[in-house]
Amino acid sequence: MDYDAFEQASRLEQAAGLLRGAGHVVVFTGAGVSAESGIPTFRDTQGLWTRFPPEQFATWTGLVRTAIFRPRRLAAFVYEVLQPIAAARPNRAHRAIERLEHHTRVTVVTQNIDGLHEDAGSTVVYSVHGTLFEIVFGQRRFLRLLSRRDLQRIGNRLARLRSAWVLPLIRLLLAIRPLVGLSWRGIHRPKLVLFGDALCQPDWNLAIEAMQSCDCVLQVGCSGQVFPAALLTLVAKEHEATVIAIDLEDTAADIWLRGPAGEILPDLLEAAFDEDLEND
Ligand code: NAD
């Protein structure tokens, strides 16, 4: 075993010991936990922000402006966000997180909008950036839930817009009507947090409470560069919790387990509780 592998193995053992002793674990997830489900992250070198700048595509005013002046470009962006989420299934990382509940109290706090923790069966999930599946109107009043199948249909309509040169704005508005539109109730849209929006409530306050009461945070696939969500781990540290990060890149944490979440999390579960994810 080379030195790096030896170091990683001893960090894994240390993290396993912490999990075994923890009465309450918060699993704090970012885009990286869903990467192995085929949903790209935004910030990485090949990420979406390199092709669709956040100033134009991550604020409601930027999106409206792009819709009016470059509808086909907006269609391409919405398609790229929607399509992988519509086709995604939970991966080994989501399943290991669900399985952790068999051994200790677990609260999942996620920045993701893809619904994969719920699909994997995690029972307590706070989505601080909202979800693509819940449609709200007015001051975030519930209107309806969409399914992955609904997203797939919207994606198919958007794909056809690529070659539509006649009335692209109208065709875009019709294509995305289940997601965003105008009706007698007002404007409806997904319950999502874009740049400059307040975080989702009550999830944000509940996430802070969880961070204040846990012994250990398992931070999975989060760069720690998305604010204010990144402040949550600081809250936990102030309350003397230990932060274990699982990520391809080094992030500020007490213990860093380097590698893909879908490999490292099942290994951690096995080291901590002798649980084999393959025995489903
Ligand atoms: P981010 O800043 O949390 O960065 C992603 C992190 O994941 C990086 O640190 C990267 O090294 C790590 N990573 C990538 N692949 C990994 C893997 N297989 N295993 C472990 N770690 C891995 O997230 P972002 O991409 O900048 O996105 C910003 C925000 O946009 C998110 O907080 C979220 O709200 C939203 N978003 C959601 C989804 C989703 O719902 N699946 C996807 C992309 C972005």
Image: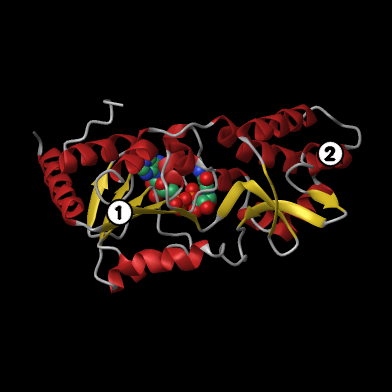
Does the rendering let one see residue 93? yes
Name the residue at 85% across, 36% down. Answer: 171
Q: Position of residue 43 (x, y in %)?
A: 49, 49
Dividing the picture into quarters, in which one does residue 239 lie?
Answer: bottom left
Q: Is residue 235 above or below residue 65?
A: below
Q: CA distance from mark 2 to mark 1?
A: 45 Å
- Residue 259 lies left or right of residue 84; in this view the side is left
**Is 205 left or right of 176, judged from the image as shown?**
left
Which corner quadrant holds the N terminus? top left
**266 vs 203: above or below:** above
Residue drawn 45% across the image and 43% down it: 117
Q: Few, some or many C-alpha atoms within 10 Å of disc 2 (few <14, some 14-19, many ≥20)?
A: some
Number of labelled discs?
Answer: 2
Numbered label attached to residue 174: 2
* Residue at the disc numbered 1: 105
**Considering depth in this image, is 97 or 46 the residue closer to the camera?**
97
Q: Residue at x 74, y 33 (%)?
A: 158
Amino acid on which the number 1 mark rests in the picture: Arg
Describe residue 275's horizontal placement relative to residue 248 as left or right.
left
Binning the other alpha carbons within 10 Å of mark 1 as few (below 14), some (14 to 19) or many (20 upward) gives some
**Residue at point 14%, 38% (across, down):** 5
The amino acid type, in three-letter code, at marker 2 is: Leu
The mark closer to the camera, 2 or 1, is 1
Q: Quadrant of residue 141?
A: bottom right
Give percent across and percent down for residue 121. Answer: 42, 40
Sequence-earlier tag: 2 or 1:
1
In the picture as drawn, the residue positioned furthest to the bottom comes out as 238
Query: On residue 132, which mark appears?
Result: none
Q: In which quadrant will I find the C terminus? A: top left
Question: Is disc 1 placed on a helix, strand or loop?
Answer: strand
